[in-house]
Image: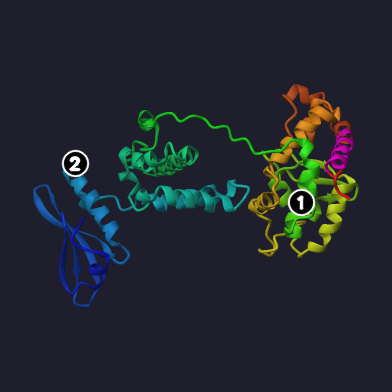
Amino acid sequence: MGNLSAETVEHAPRGKHSDGDGLSLVVKPSGARSWVVRVSVNGRKRDIGIGPWPAVGLAVARQRRDEIKTDAKAGRDPTTQRSDVPTFGQAAERVCDMMRPTWRDPRHGDIWLGRLRKHAAPLWHMRADRITRSDVLAVLHPIWHSKPEIARRIRQGIRKVLGWVMAHHEHMLANAAGEGIDAALPRTPKVANHQRAIHYDDVPEAMCRIEHSEASPASRLCLQFLILTGVRSGEARGARWSEIDPDATWTIPADRMKGGNAEHRVPLSKQALDVLTEARELDDGSGLIFPSPLRHGRELSWQALLKVLRTNGVDSTAHGFRTSLRQWLLECSGASWAVAEACLAHTLGNSVERAYVRQADLFDQRRQVMSDWANFATSSLP
């Protein structure tokens, strides 16, 4: 711990105030404050400026002092350090901007950057080429077992950022988050991430509870529509009126489908059409069928659907109803494997098998099967 505190740094009188180990705060008669580090370079004592306060805070000043002294001990001249190398945080922001156009949901970039800023905070203000394997391990070890999935993503993020720096700065020869730390990170058991689901026999009762819930109309109707059509949560929440065709067909564009490879046509049962008729009253001009009642022109959040289920005692996630439908398709519908997979927008086998599947016939069969599912799912409703 140094001699200075955040309060003394802000209110120190003019003069030079030592924090210890070579770091000092210099306060000029004008009140301007800046940091200097005294270090021995090639046998000569030198004062190296590391920036003004408050742009460089106390914690960052101490960190830069340690980096400079490390360079000096290793025989590197810190007075000739490369000024074009970004900090880890600066590099992370540039990588995020680079990848943002590739993400289907523009919010994903903010989530990726926020997660990295939170869990890799000790690296954020470090110059990227000064980050060592020990620095990366110090970030990962505390969460490696307690939050294995997050830890894995953080390591991937750090590796991506440092890889970008390596690509732009040839003197950086190794990635501190690369294979070199594998031996220091023990294997973590893989945990199956199954979405909670209810048996299909319980779906009619769940539909009844949802119908009589006190949830917002948008959340209630979106959840009912999701169950009746068997689609994923994001596909239902992002549904737009422009995707509904007059022939009772919902055509989801490829860029809103998982994988983004092809559009998906969903046959709409009478019950699904009834939901859409009721949803007309929610129109806010955004084009969304189920717009958020809290954020004008925005989609519902997945938490909004989960809250409806939790508050009404339905022990399933929204995605879990796809499991319920899949189970019903296998055991009760009499549908072929190909029809069942097509109902859930799953890829139908390999390329050879798909060549023998007539999509038009499957769509007609799916329309009948999904009508039967809707009749079953709503059988407890008046």
**Can the viewer see residue 344 in this picture?**
no
Q: Residue at x 24, y 64 (%)?
A: 5
Residue 369 sits in quarter: top right
Going from N to C along the chain, the mark reached first, 2 or 1, is 2
Q: What x and y, as percent, mark residue 286?
A: 74, 62
Q: Main secondary structure of the magenta part?
A: helix
Dot 2: within a 10 Å radius of its alpha carbon, few (fewer than 14), some, or many (20 or more) residues?
Answer: few
Quadrant location of the N terminus in the rendered image = bottom left
Identify the disc placed on residue 210. 1
Q: Residue at x 19, y 77 (%)?
A: 29
Residue beneath label 2, please? Answer: 74
Instruction: Say which of 320 and 149 sits in front.
Output: 320
* Badge 2 amino acid: Ala
Report whether 246 appears left or right of 346.
right
**Can the viewer see residue 186 in this picture?**
yes
Separation of residues labelled 2 and 1 (CA atoms): 67 Å
Q: Secondary structure at mark 1?
A: helix
Is residue 366 a member of the stretch shown in magenta?
Answer: yes
Report whether 234 appears left or right of 369.
left
* Residue interval drawn in magenta: 365-377
Residue 351 sits in quarter: top right
